[in-house]
Amino acid sequence: MVFPEVMMHRDAIIYVAGHAGLIGSAVVRRLERDGYRTPITRQRSEVDLRDARQVSEFFEEVHPKYVILAAGRVGGIMENQTCPADFMDENMAIQLNVLMAARRAGVQRLILFGSSCMYPRECSQPMAEHALLSGKPEPTSLPYAISKLAGTYLCLAYNKQDHATRFIPVIPNSAYGPHDNFDPKSAHVLSALMARFHQAKVSGAESVALWGSGSPRREFIHADDIADACVHLLSQDELAVELPLNIGVGQDVSIKELAEMIARVVGYRGELEWDRTKPDGAPRKLLDSTRIQSLGWKPHIGLAEGLAETYRWYVRQVETATGPMPEVRR
Ligand SMILES: NC(=O)c1ccc[n+]([C@@H]2O[C@H](COP(=O)([O-])OP(=O)(O)OC[C@H]3O[C@@H](n4cnc5c(N)ncnc54)[C@H](OP(=O)(O)O)[C@@H]3O)[C@@H](O)[C@H]2O)c1
C-alpha cells in the first residue's frame, strides 16, 4: 500500500477523537507512520465527548491545531431501529461540543465524518454532494442521518461565518478494516459476514443463512484509504469548503459478490443460502467521488487485498481472546 507524499505540519498538535475506533485508529496509524508528532488521544473515561464541560476544558488545556473527529455512535440497521434516540442525541452532542470547543480554541482545520445515509433514499446514482437535502433519507436510519447532517452543515456554517475556520465534513462510504466492529448484534454487513463465515468454518456448518436476495450493491472503502484522504485534505492550502466531500472508491459490488469474496478469504466452503423473504434495503449506494479526486486523491487498497488483511487482523483478535483456532472441520 503506497501512499503519495503530502504535507501537513509534522510538529503540529493533532487531536484524534475516537482513536480506538475503525477510522480513528487508521488515522493514528497513518500519522505515526508518516512521522507526525504523536497525536493527542483520550479515552472516553478521560473525556466523555457528550459532556460539554469536559470537552471545553480539554480543548483549553491542549489547544490542538488540527482535529479529526472520528468519535460517534455507530451501528447497523438493527441498533439504529432499537436505539434511534441514542444515535441522534449522542452524535449531535459529540459534534456540537467538539465543534464549539474547537471554534473557541481557534482550531482552523477539522475533519468531521458524515455518512452516506445522509443522502436521499431515492438519490440518483452515483450520489453527488449537491444531492444532499434534495429528498428524505432512508427512514430506518433517519435519526442518525439527521444528526450527521446537523454536524455537516454546522461545519459549513462556521466556515461561512468565520472565514478563518476550515472545518471539512467528509462522507466516506461503508468503511472496513482492522478495529472494525465484529459483534453480530451491532456490526455492519462486511464485518458481520466475516465473523459469521469464520464461525461457520470453525464449527463446520454446512450452510450459512443470509438476509435478502444479495442483489443490492454497496461501496466499501478501507479505513486506511479514508485516513489517507483526511491527511490529504488537511494538507490542502487552498481548499474552499462550501460542501462536504465524498470519499469513495468509485466501484461497488453486490452483497452476493461481497459474501462470496469474504467466504473465499475466510476459507469457508459451505453453502450461502439467501432468504429472499427478508428485506433488501436500498438497491444501490455508490458515491460520486469526482470532487475529492479532482483534488489529487485516489484510493489505493483493492477490496480483495483489504478483506484479506482485515481477516488476518480479525483472526489475531479471536486467537488472542480464545487461543489458537481449533482445527477446521470442513
Ligand atoms: N464505519 C463506517 O462505515 C462509517 C462510514 C461513514 C462514516 N462513519 C463515521 O465515522 C466516524 C467513525 O466511525 P467508526 O466506524 O470508526 O466508529 P467506531 O469504530 O465505532 O469508533 C467510534 C469511536 O468513538 C468513540 N466514542 C464514541 N462515543 C464517545 C464519547 N461519548 N466520548 C468519547 N469517545 C467516544 C468510541 O470510543 P469507545 O471505544 O469508548 O466506545 C470509539 O473509539 C463516525 O462519526 C461515523 O458516523 C463511519
Image (spheres, helix red, strand yellow):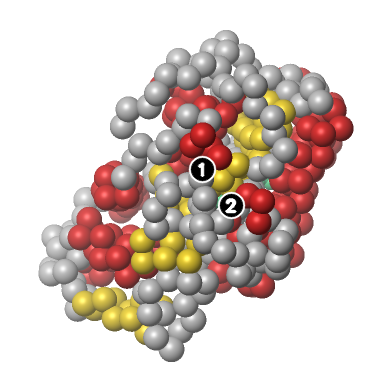
User: 202 or 72: which is nearer to us?
Assistant: 72
Give residue 61's quadrant in the image: top right
Left or right relative to 106: residue 203: left
Q: Residue furthest bottom?
A: 277
**Left or right: residue 214 compared with residue 64:** left
Outermost residue toward the right in this view: 161
The answer as to whether callout 1 falls within 8 Å of ligand 1 is: no
Question: Which mark is on residue 260?
Answer: none
Question: Residue 233, relative to residue 209: is it above or below?
Answer: above
Residue holding disc 2? 128
In the image, 296 versus 182, the foreground residue is 296
Q: Is residue 35 visible?
A: yes
Closer to the chain start, of discs 1 and 2, is: 2
Q: CA distance from mark 1 to mark 2?
A: 8 Å
Residue occupying image coordinates x 56% and y 45%? 246
Q: Which residue is mark 1?
A: 290
Secondary structure beneath dot 2 equals: loop
Q: Position of residue 153 (x, y in %)?
A: 76, 46
Residue placed at 27% from the left, 50% from the top? 304
Residue 223 image offset from top left, x and y in percent? 45, 42
Q: Residues within 10 Å of mark 2 (few under 14, many from 20)?
A: some
Q: Residue at x 59, y 23 (%)?
A: 236
Amino acid carrying label 1: it is Thr
Q: Position of residue 151 (x, y in %)?
A: 74, 46
Q: Is mark 2 within 8 Å of ligand 1?
A: no
Above or below, 73 against 134 in this view is above
Element on which disc 1 rests: helix
Badge 1 vs badge 2, beta-carbon distance below 8 Å? yes
Kind of residue at badge 2 = Ala
Horizontal arrangement in the rendering, residue 321 relative to residue 204 (left or right): right
